[in-house]
Image: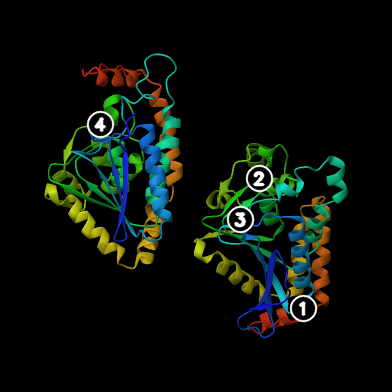
Amino acid sequence: MTMTTTYKNILTAKEAVPGLKGVNIGVVTLNRPTVLNALNHELMEELVQALTDHDKDDSVRVIVLTGSERAFAAGADIKEMSDETTVSIMLKDRFATWDRIRAIKKPIIAAISGYALGGGCELTMMCDMIIASESAQFGQPEINIGVIPGAGGTQRLTRAVGKYKAMELILTGRPFTAHEALEMGFINRVVPTELYLDEAKNLAFELSQKSPIALQLAKEAVLKSFDGTLSEGLQFERKNFYMLFSSEDQKEGMKAFIEKRKATFNGK
Amino acid sequence: MTDEKILLTEKKNGVGIITLNRPDRLNAFNDELSFQFQDALKEMEKDKEIKAIILTGAGRGFCAGQDLQSRNIAQEGGEKPSLGESIRRRYNPLVIKLRRMEKPIIAAVNGVAAGAGMSLAMLCDYRIVHDKVSFIQSFTKVGLIPDSGSTFILPRMIGYTKAFELMLSAEKFSAQEALEYGLVNKIVAEDQVMTEATALAEKLALGPTKAFGLTKRALNRAIFHDLEELLEYEAQLQEIAGRSEDFSEGVKAFVEKRTPVYKGK
């Protein structure tokens, strides 16, 4: 694992994909242990920078985003915003940073253990797949301090688990366990706490075997399904499907299939 | 209030010992004792020097379960206490902690284990008893359902038929019977219960405790996967039982030391 850039609130590294020369996964770790990785503005800026760097790095195929065993992120930094007014908080436009995470093209896998509350839960939902430890605890507790989720919680949780569960979780603010999250279809897998990061990395390694260009267009098409109508989404998917026929990876992938051998993708 | 501690804890040779200490009430649970017990378990879970735990009772009883004379149960008139809430706050966290803690817990059963006292003994990982010990699923005697995990630990340990019989008869059964059902590990002489439990705990404490913890986790997954859900269901059903006329009559008869007259309502 090689460390690339030094940040104050996060760690970022590249890890070689076994069996694929020169191919890596990016691993970004939230690292404000004294405050259970509370998400302040500075951390979010650093996070977006690190994700963007991995996104631009041709050697990186997939990104894993994680925290510590005790906490992925216990929420937004409340101290940072308790004295804000409507105008002051609007002018600061803190969620502009979050919007930039949406623009990351490579798949992001969340590896969650411990608290993923409030902003931590919303950040989890911005990822493309979620691996949780048995001790992971999710929740949108904003209602308990007199506000509501502000970084996409009301929209993404509802799309993930449906109206009635989302209403219950957002209006009561109660936390929910990894097993409950799995039952609701909110996350992909639950594994013993000692293994959640390995599980997420292994999934990232598995995806790294695929054509990066196909991964990117697939991610884009799935996300498109959350915006707009089905017709638009189907059109979008079809265009992305057609587009892949001008890639080397499509030629290689189909040729390898016919020749009954494993494909080697180069991302072109 | 007295200065007497109702719960004693001790740490020796890698073993944590928790002693329920209300001997005049056969160590029955009042609110305070259940909360102190929860705290003690939490601390022993965190304490890295503690590798195994012994749970025992002071005096001639192990634990008589819920203290029916404690303030919140034996209420004269007025609003009935919510048994569901009481279970959620007091007993269910104990059950969850006993099961989820990845350290072996030995019940050194030094005397009668009744009601929740029996349930909790069954939720430990080992049970060492002596030949005069008796067990009783006393709940239905006062018109309640077996709680503190009883309704799922017992059938899983001894099968539905025997479990249902023990619960509805609400009669005492002996250490020997418990051994035959597979409910206890070993019967020893009365003065050897703690000695035996301590020897076992100290031996376990020197073992591969990481693997022991993971073994417990695997068995939990195998037979207690739905622990929290079933505990909540028990609490709901106990709430219903707690509102019944039979329960009021049961507690009244118990306090007045007479035979209850039930109506099935």
Q: In percent of the image, x 70 and y 60: which residue is there?
A: A127
Where is residue B175 drawn, in percent x and y? 16, 44
Which residue does the image show at 76% across and 59% down from the upper left? A42
Amino acid at dot 3:
Ile
- Front-lying residue, A57 or B159: A57
Q: Residue at label 4?
A: B25
Could you tell me which secondary element the residue under label 2 belongs to?
loop
The residue tagged 1 is: A58
Q: Are marks 1 and 4 on the same chain?
A: no
The number of numbered badges drawn on the structure is 4
Horizontal placement of B251 versus A17: left or right?
left
- The residue under label 2 is A140
Chain to which mark 1 belongs: A
Cα distance in 3D space between marks 3 and 1: 28 Å
The mark nearer the N terminus, 3 or 1, is 1
Q: Output the chain of dot 4.
A: B
| 10 Å crowding of disc 3: few (<14), some (14-19), many (20+) | many
Q: Is label 4 in a helix, a strand or a loop? A: helix
CA–CA distance between discs 2 and 4?
45 Å
Evaluate if marks 1 and 2 touch, with contact meaning CB atoms under 8 Å apart: no
Name the quadrant of the C terminus of chain B.
top left
Amino acid type of the residue tagged 4 in the rendering:
Arg
Element under label 3? Answer: loop
Labels 3 and 1 share a subunit: yes
Amino acid, disc 2: Gln
Q: Residue A136's spot in the image, x, y percent? A: 56, 54
Camera-side residue of B12 and A46: B12
What residue is disc 3 on? A187
